[in-house]
């Protein structure tokens, strides 16, 4: 069966789904909706098998494509109907199953929506950023040369730097897109609206732009 390819408004390249039947356009045809399957995640526990932290899984539903060469910014308003711990909507950067970065709007163990980043180079480096009082937040991934920056915003206007990192100097094989996960639960629904892709270099990481 051929892989499912979606054209998403705001994205100038096709995105390929890792699993059939998860991704769809919203009723207005302007946003992207995913129904995350149960017990799905992208996470390689740094403590190894049997660690007390979250289980290592590489089975989350993804929707990814190859961006044009050069610098860019990808942003979206992410909304999640949180049901279980670690349910999340994600902007995903992917090289291979050992090297990737995900920028998450995630349900914390304390039952709070939270901005979380995970960068994986063999094992996952997991870092919490801040709690969000609502069930939606804006997330943005920017490529600057061979580096990437994660920014979050509660209003889509003023952006807070969360993380800067690199997966190495070679970026031509990297893919970018979306992910939906429900590691401990029976699934959740994630909606991405206001999706925007700009081939623009971010000039300042910390000035809120």
Image (cartoon, grey):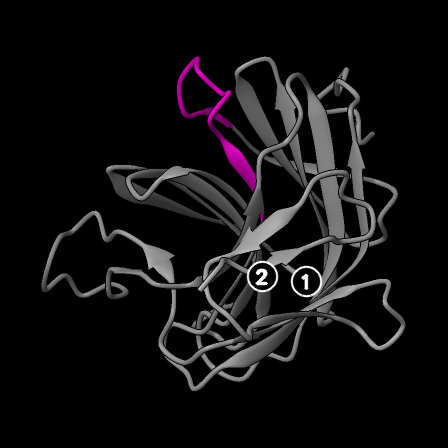
- Left or right of 39? Residue 18 is right
Closer-to-camera residue (129/142)? 142
Name the spot of residue 115 as percent of width and height, x first.
59, 54
Q: CA distance from mark 2 to mark 1?
A: 5 Å
Task: Look at the image and tell me in which quarter the N terminus lies.
Answer: bottom left
Quadrant of res 31: bottom right
Name the spot of residue 33 as percent of width and height, x first.
69, 70
| Residue labelled with disc 2 | 114
Task: Look at the image and tell me in which quarter the C terminus lies.
Answer: top right
Q: Residues within 10 Å of mark 2 (few under 14, many from 20)?
A: many
Q: Is residue 20 visible?
A: yes
Please name the residue shown 82% across and 46% down the image: 10
Instruction: Classify 209 as above or below 85.
Output: above
| Residue labelled with disc 1 | 132
Q: In this picture, which residue range is highlighted in magenta?
A: 165-177
Q: Tell which circle, 2 or 1, labels the residue nearer the N-terminal end.
A: 2
Instruction: Classify 99 as above or below 103.
Output: above
């Amino acid at each position: 069966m051929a892989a499912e390819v979606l054209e998403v408004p705001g994205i100038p390249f096709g995105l390929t789904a890792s699993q059939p039947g998860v991704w769809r356009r919203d009723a207005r045809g302007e946003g992207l909706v995913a129904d995350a399957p149960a017990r799905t995640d992208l996470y390689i526990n740094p403590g190894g098998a049997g660690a007390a932290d979250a289980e290592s899984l590489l089975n989350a539903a993804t929707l990814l494509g190859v961006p044009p060469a050069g610098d860019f910014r990808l942003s979206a308003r992410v909304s999640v109907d949180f049901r279980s711990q670690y349910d999340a909507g994600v902007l995903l950067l992917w090289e291979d199953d050992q090297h990737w970065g995900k920028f998450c709007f995630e349900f914390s163990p304390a039952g709070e929506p939270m901005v979380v980043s995970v960068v994986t180079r063999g094992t996952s480096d997991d870092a919490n950023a801040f709690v969000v009082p609502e069930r939606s937040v804006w997330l943005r991934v920017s490529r600057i040369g061979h580096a990437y920056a994660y920014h979050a915003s509660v209003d889509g206007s003023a952006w807070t730097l969360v993380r800067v990192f690199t997966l190495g100097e070679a970026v031509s094989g990297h893919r970018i897109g979306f992910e939906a996960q429900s590691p401990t639960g029976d699934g959740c629904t994630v909606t991405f609206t206001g999706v925007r892709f700009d081939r623009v270099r971010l000039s300042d990481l910390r000035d809120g732009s």
